[in-house]
Amino acid sequence: MVKRQLDVSNDIPNGHPEVSKYVFEDVDLYGENEEKNKNVSKENKESGPPPVSFLSLFQYASRRDKILIAIGCLAPLLSGGSMPAIVVLLGDLLDTFVLYSQNPKNDEIYKNSSNATPFSVFNMAEEDAIMQGFLSEIRKFGLGMALIGVIVLFLNYIMVTCLSVSAENQAFRIRHYFMKAVVRQDLAWFDTHQTGDFASRATTDLNRIQDGIGEKIGMCVFFMSTTIVSFVVALVYGWKLTLVILSVMPILVISGGVLAKVQATLSANELTAYGSAGAVAEEVLSSIRTVVAFGGERKEIERYEKNLVQARKNGIKRSLVTSIGASMVWLCIYGSYALAFWYGVKLIIESREAGNNEYVPSTLIIVFFNVLMGAMNMGQASPYLEAFAIARGAAGMIFEIIERIPLIDSSSETGEKPATLEGNVEFHNVHFSYPARPDVPVLQGLGFEVKSGETVALVGASGCGKSTVVQLIQRFYDPKEGQ
């Protein structure tokens, strides 16, 4: 066995005949460049991927999951008509009370007025007919309410069950793909990403994704379908009053769209900042003995707090935007209430003066409460839109990692597989820099050859690149130039 020694230090003794002149540039891998490495990682994190689209949240759903999602969305779509139906039944009941109270017989009994029609003109058959008609309307209202309750109970059970099962299946699949993707990445990628982020993303971010693809979708569909059906019913019963009330809706829609866009961006930034803080905490806890030995507790706490500052700022901005958006929503809603009572009573009076029944008390009630329910359900859907925005922001980094194909893929089955292998190692004009410090050259034109059976020692000062040579042989990295 032949033994050779290669001096890879910069300080090569002049005229030394036994030293091979294969020189590495002396680079401090972990000293003064550590802060630079952190800054590069921080820049990479701040320029993270944008939020994904809403439909992209379901890209890992199986066919069975998609069927469950379709059923889970169809059920609240159907149950969304329950509230408008209740309002219509309530309006019909109100008309029944009004007509019954205006009956001349009731004037005789309850008002005892001298101008009322004498009680004698009513026979028992007419009294029974009036009472039976009144009780029939009451019975119709009670049965209708009970039937609607049973239908809504059944549809909501289907909604929650289907969407929850689908969300659990997708979250399980995403966690599996995420862990598989992280393990297969090349070391160059790990050099520019803090490993502490992965634990927080595998828990917090994935939980937010699951929250955004679960039963909240069904609740949002229920509220939106209720809003649409309520407005349609209101237009059918009294289009004039409905259009006047809906004049404030453009402001509501525009403010909601701007709110959702800003929330998605701020939530993505907030999650990135929390990921940085989580990486610091995991790093410190994993090396707690070293931290305590050097008395670095206070320093690490300050470093953790420094990473939380940006998360707090983004959280405050997101909360402020949410509160402003909610204020605009409720301002529009209560403004429409005032407009409805003022214009609705005006239409009823004009209808009576014209001698038609276009607008009666039940019309005002049906239109007002349907628009009220529509606006309220639109407002109640806002928190769910925020949850979807948070899920889209959280999915940006998760899906990017899952879909990333590493430059050196250890799990790939493609490529040439030599039938025989000789244990010769050759470096031909190799240039190399670490991905975290691309502007700092480590190897500059390195070239040497090690025959099979030889033992070669790489010697040199700490940080001169000895470990780099071994890592290139193991193909942890690929050279920039050379072979």
Image (cartoon, rainbow, N blue to C red):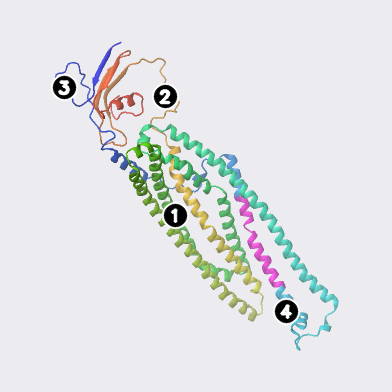
- Quadrant, the C terminus: top left
What's the distance in space between the residues labelled 1 and 3, CA to CA? Answer: 64 Å
Mark 2 and mark 3 lie on one chain; the one further toward the N terminus is 3
Q: Amino acid at mark 4?
A: Gln
Magenta stretch bounds = 73-96
According to the image, label 2 marks what residue? 415
According to the image, label 1 marks what residue? 263
According to the image, label 3 marks what residue? 13
Mark 1 secondary-structure assignment: helix
- Crowding near the residue tagged with mark 1, few <14, some 14–19, many ≥20 C-alpha atoms within 10 Å: many
Mark 4 and mark 3 lie on one chain; the one further toward the N terminus is 3
Name the spot of residue 389 as percent of width and height, x first: 47, 51
What's the distance in space between the residues labelled 2 and 3, CA to CA? Answer: 44 Å
Mark 1 and mark 3 lie on one chain; the one further toward the N terminus is 3
What's the distance in space between the residues labelled 4 and 2, CA to CA? Answer: 91 Å
What's the distance in space between the residues labelled 4 and 3, CA to CA? Answer: 118 Å
- Crowding near the residue tagged with mark 4, few <14, some 14–19, many ≥20 C-alpha atoms within 10 Å: few
Give above or below for 250 relative to 23: below
- Inspect the magenta stretch and tell me whether residue 421 lies in it: no
Mark 2 and mark 1 lie on one chain; the one further toward the N terminus is 1
Name the spot of residue 200 as percent of width and height, x first: 45, 42
What's the distance in space between the residues labelled 1 and 4, CA to CA? Answer: 55 Å
